[in-house]
């Protein structure tokens, strides 16, 4: 079995029977929906999904900053008052 990134799981057939009940039982926690004992997809609430997207964007920005700081020698000095 692959790694699961949540402590709450439900089978695909159980999820298809009553998705609303799965969401209610999850109480805002992430849920892994399993198909043949492997995660087919995860259910996360919108606030958690937004936080994950923002964290990924922050990581990308951090990588850009690190890359650009190594390129400082190529920078061109500009006077903002003359632009």
Image (tube, rainbow, N blue to C red):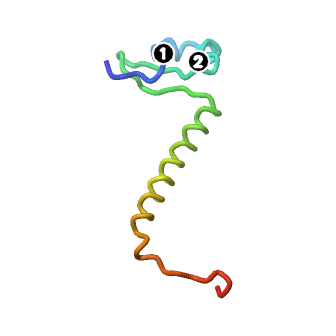
Give the mark count: 2
Task: Give the quarter of the image for residue 55.
Answer: top right
- Earlier in the chain: of badge 2 and badge 1, it is 1
Q: Residue at x 50, y 44 (%)?
A: 56
Residue sitting at the far bottom: 82
Label ID, residue 37: none
Q: Residues within 10 Å of mark 1 (few under 14, many from 20)?
A: few
Q: Position of residue 6 (x, y in %)?
A: 48, 20
Q: Nearer the viewer, residue 51 or 17?
A: 51
> Position of 43 compared to 40: left or right?
right
Residue at 40%, 23% (x, y): give it: 39
Residue nearer the viewer, 59 or 23: 59
Q: Outermost residue, right direction?
A: 81
Residue 5 image offset from top left, x and y in percent: 44, 24
Residue occupying image coordinates x 48% and y 80%: 76
Marks 2 and 1 sit apart, C-alpha to C-alpha, by 18 Å
Residue at image mark 1: 7
Judged left or right of residue 50, residue 68 is left
Q: Tell me the quadrant of the picture where the N terminus can be found.
A: top left
Nearest-to-viewer mark from 2 and 1: 1
**Circle 2: is it few (<14), some (14-19), or many (20+) Cα within 10 Å?**
few
Mark 1 residue element: loop
Mark 2 element type? helix
Q: Which residue is mark 2?
A: 19
Observer-nearest of 67 and 33: 67
Q: Is residue 46 above or below residue 76?
A: above
Q: Nearer the viewer, residue 53 or 20?
A: 53
Left or right of 26, for residue 65? left
Position of 75 relative to 29 (above/below): below
Residue visible at 61% across and 18% down?
A: 23
């Amino acid at each position: 079995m692959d790694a699961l990134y949540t402590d709450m799981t439900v089978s695909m057939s159980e999820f298809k029977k009553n998705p609303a009940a799965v969401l209610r039982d999850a109480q805002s926690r992430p849920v892994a929906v399993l198909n043949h004992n492997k995660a087919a997809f995860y259910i996360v609430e919108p606030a958690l999904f937004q936080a994950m997207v923002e964290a990924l964007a922050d990581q990308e920005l951090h990588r850009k900053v690190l890359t650009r700081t190594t390129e400082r020698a190529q920078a061109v000095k500009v006077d903002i008052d003359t632009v």
